[in-house]
Amino acid sequence: MSSLTTTEADQAASARSKKRLTAFLFVVPLLAFILLTFVAPIGSMLWRSVHHPAVAELIPLTLVELQRWDGTALPDETTLNVFAQELHGLAKERLSGKLSEELNRAYTGMSSVVKSSARRIARIETEQLATQGAGTLLKAHGNWSKPEVWYAIKRAGAVYTYDYYLTALDLELHPEQGIQVREDTQIYLQLYGKTLNMALVITLFCALLGYPLAYYLAGLPENRANLLLVLVLLPFWTSLLVRTTAWIALLQTNGVINSFLLSTGLISQPIEMLYTSFATVVAMTHILLPFMILPLYSVMRGIDPSYLRAALSLGAKPIPAFARIYFPMTLPGLSAGALLVFIISVGYYITPALVGGTDGQMISNIIAFHMQRSNNWELAAALGSLLLGLILLLYWVYDRFVGASNIKLG
């Protein structure tokens, strides 16, 4: 009897193992898809934000010589001769332009310096550079006499660096004073602040517009509510470019809104609405409004209306009864919709690029600029990593405070 019981237990355990294996095999395609389309790109972005071997591959011998440099005065003649020889080789291989691009990111103005010096050094024989390279380099341009230039070259030659994160935070590393605020350009922190502010305004407008509409839909009979809900979902079936282009037609100087206001005499000249922050907020509010309405409607539909009627029957006034009874029960839907709208709007790209102009640009547009035009993928990766960290932080705050309060209400 004991042996039979043991055998049956083994068979049951084997059956459970087979079921778990079967369930896992069904999930494997989804896991592979997530790894390839989500985890791998994010990992590549994080890696690229700190890994930059371009300069180390172009002038490896110079960087080895700079390891002996104390960073105060000009590097010794041997180091300058080695750099001149490597610059001569890059000029012959037509790679000096790549070096000029990399060094210009480390020290402003080095693009023309490297190119002009490469052309001058390319005319000298290779054998002469071992003794005359330093003098030729110093005569080519005065920037080669500045220790801070060589410090920037040494920093740019590091294979692993956090300099792009410093740039993304409008900071720089000074050889003597350490990390400090950049003096030349301070744009990225302002863009982050502007992006968060616009995302907050969009979320607020979506809540103000979506809450009454969701409340109205929740109070209708199911057949009428489903019919009107189709109209809410209709924008999902329309191309994003079509909806954005429609706002361009509405908001431009000679568009529908300005033409109507001029014809009624309310304004004497067209209002500049397109290519502003206002246009970005209006267009994105229209696009993201369904993401606020749907969570609110799903929560409101499940609230028993007898709670509010009971409060009114006990003598409570409508507004206090709504604020103290009904509204707290809708907070899970409101917080979920606000989180969706806010996070989506923080990383939105197409609509601000089409209707925002310079004034309505967000941080995502600057990331796209560095990837598509300036080819500074490392800085774009650093900006994207910081944006990812910001979104994760916001989600943690939501889960820590708002999510916990929703559980208590439930």
Image: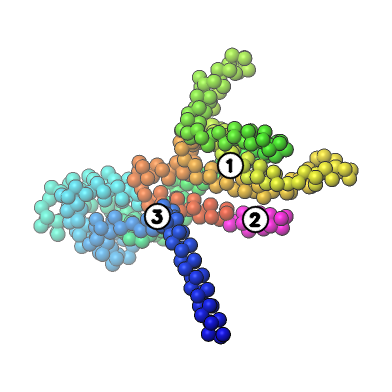
Disc 2, SS: helix
- 199 vs 17, nearest the viewer: 17
Q: Earlier in the sequence, mark 1 or mark 3?
A: 3
Q: Label 1 near label 2: C-beta < 8 Å? A: no
Label 3 belongs to which residue? 36
**Which quarter of the image is occupied by the C terminus?**
bottom right
Disc number at residue 291?
1
Residue farthest to the right? Answer: 315
Q: Earlier in the sequence, mark 2 or mark 1?
A: 1
Mark nearest the camera among 3 and 2 is 3
In the rendered image, the vertical position of residue 17 relative to residue 294, given as above or below? below
Quadrant of residue 309 within the rendered picture: top right
Amino acid found under the numbered disc labelled 1: Phe
Residue 258's x, y, as percent?
56, 20
Residue 166's x, y, as percent?
44, 55
The figure's colour scheme reads: rainbow
Disc 3, SS: helix
Distance Cα–Cα, label 2 vs label 1: 18 Å
- 138 vs 182, nearest the viewer: 182
Quadrant of residue 373 within the rendered picture: top left
Amino acid found under the numbered disc labelled 3: Leu
Disc number at residue 403?
2
Which span of residues is magenta-colored? 396-410
Q: Earlier in the sequence, mark 3 or mark 2?
A: 3
Residue farthest to the bottom? Answer: 2
- 182 vs 310, nearest the viewer: 310
Distance Cα–Cα, label 3 vs label 2: 30 Å
Number of marks: 3
Amino acid found under the numbered disc labelled 2: Gly
Please identify the dominant SS of the magenta region: helix
